[in-house]
Image: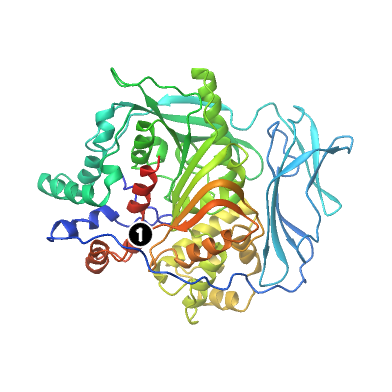
Amino acid sequence: MAPSLFELSPMRFHPPSLLSTLAVCALVAACGGRSSDPVATPSSTLIPVPDPTVACSILRVTPDNAIKQTFVDPLMTIVYAAPSAGACGDLTLQDSSRSAVAATVVASSEWPNPQGGYIGTRTIEAAAALNPAAIYSLRWNDKTISTFKTGTERRGAVVSVTEQALQLPSLPDAAHLGQGDINDVLDSLAELMAKGNDIKKALFATVLRHELPNIARPDARFGASIGKLAYRSADARGNPVTLSALLIAPEQSPGGTPVEFNGMPIVVGQRGSTDNNSDAPSSGATTMAIPGLIAAGKGQVFVAPDLIGLGDSKALPQAYLVAADTAGQTQDLLRAVRAHFQEQYRSTLGMDLRLFGGSQGAHSTIASLPYLAREGTVRVVSASQGPYDVYRTFHGALLALGGAARDAYAINENLDFLPGRTRDVMTSFQAYGNYAFDAKTVFDADGKILPSFLADYKDGKVKDFVRQLGANSLVTGSQVYDLPQAQVQLYHFSADTLVPAQNTVDMLAALADRKHRFASIQRGNCHENSELVKLIVRLSKSSTTTHTICVAFQIDDFVGGL
């Protein structure tokens, strides 16, 4: 059975689908109308100003020193510690004769570290493609920090595009679906819920048609072709790797409207977290394909990256909540998609981009914004349940687990999930952030967090972990977003027990700062005061229902705007 679209929790934890709880409504006479969510107050907008006691030091540089076969057009990233904002200078590029090479800034942020100094992340790329098989150096703080050699490949090169049969119930097990199949996509959700019981399927379908009108009535103008796209991207060291993604494109139905790919908008969907052995979006076996089918039916190209550690790269560790890697790999996918349509159809896809994601996928969506803005015009940003402030998400929970009073981030959190999430993020930072991680000093034999680690964390002794959390936090850094056409909607159930809703409250407040430009910024409506949602929360036996409950409304709103 394919996992639900709404299973978007952190790695190795898979809560039951939101849709399985909607059966509650099918058993009552009235579900009540939709209503607005309660208003929440932002927490302190900035971490306290740190003391300038940390010398300039490097946490990570990409391409790593002595890499011999990086791309001709590599992304170059440094993660560093600094005593104060801007104290360590810019990241610059030189050729083998030590002449400066023009480069542009892709993303840049400095995060005020409460333990002292700032944690910076800066990504640049050359203004023009570098020479193949040539030596270049990165300089920072008046020192050469990496010398690498380019190869002959370019980021985003297409490796292959193969047909991928869809594997969802009530829909054909095929790589080509017609308009009618897309218009009946809601039946697939109902059958996933019913698990073979026809009576329950009919009840669920009735409820979903009432609550999710845009998914229930896609009004498809086209059919859809489903495929897996393999493309070249980079790991954290700068080595080329092959990654995979789901690709769903509009297709002419018999007697239907011809497809014109020139100028066609692109939708980028970011998955929630899962373990390496689970179905990837590119498999066609996850319900990530459902919004993809609707997008294709409405005349838009849909892509969803597996990201490193899933799909074709499942033998590698995942870059869980590692912002720079997720962003770079998504940018490379967008380049690959454009290249494929140019080569296969002699068509130039449009510049309009619409983005959505949930949980880890919400973090991926916001992290990718500066990168994707270089590839097109971002029109819509829809994200739900994101751990945007990675530091405060873990900080509040770790202190609470150690016995401290719960802060705004830990107030509703189920601390039983914290050990697994902590191990996952530490493993990710070890693989992609040069974080020295010894599990025996953090976890006992049963996987629980050791009291000694909690005490050290409380006393400010776990400095390297805090630096990694800060490097991947998106709320309190100095990154500036210039997306004047983008309509931003962030969703979060106020009593989410898995990812604190304060993330979304604070992210919205941060994005409203005048240094950014957006067309609009608003909180998406989870309809949590509706009778339906109240019944689900009250009667569900799952403590994680509050983490998944918004996603159905988010996706319904999103596809309604396509």
Quadrant location of the N terminus in the rendered image: top left
Residue in the picture at 85% in, 51% down: 143
Instruction: Please name whichever residue, 1 or 110, is drawn nearer the observer in this view of the structure.
Output: 110
Task: Using the image, determine if residue 372 lies above or below residue 498.
Answer: above
* Viewer-proximal residue among 1 and 375: 375
Q: Could you say where residue 424 lies in the image, as x and y percent from the top left?
A: 49, 57
Residue 257 position, x and y percent, is 34, 21
The image quarter in which residue 281 lies = top left
Give percent across and percent down for residue 36: 35, 63
Q: Quadrant of residue 474?
A: bottom right
Name the residue rendered at 21%, 45% in the picture.
190
For label 1, count other residues whose C-alpha is less than 10 Å away and answer few (under 14), some (14-19) or many (20+): many
Q: Is residue 296 left or right of residue 186?
A: right
In the image, farthest residue toward the left: 199
Instruction: Please name the residue that numbered disc 1 is placed on.
Output: 526
Image side of residue 228 versus residue 484, left or right: left
Q: Quadrant of the C terminus?
A: top left
Q: Quadrant of residue 152?
A: top right
Q: Secondary structure at mark 1?
A: loop
Counting from the top left corner in percent of width and height, residue 486 is at 53, 47
Q: Amino acid at mark 1?
A: Cys
Left or right: 118 in relation to 352: right
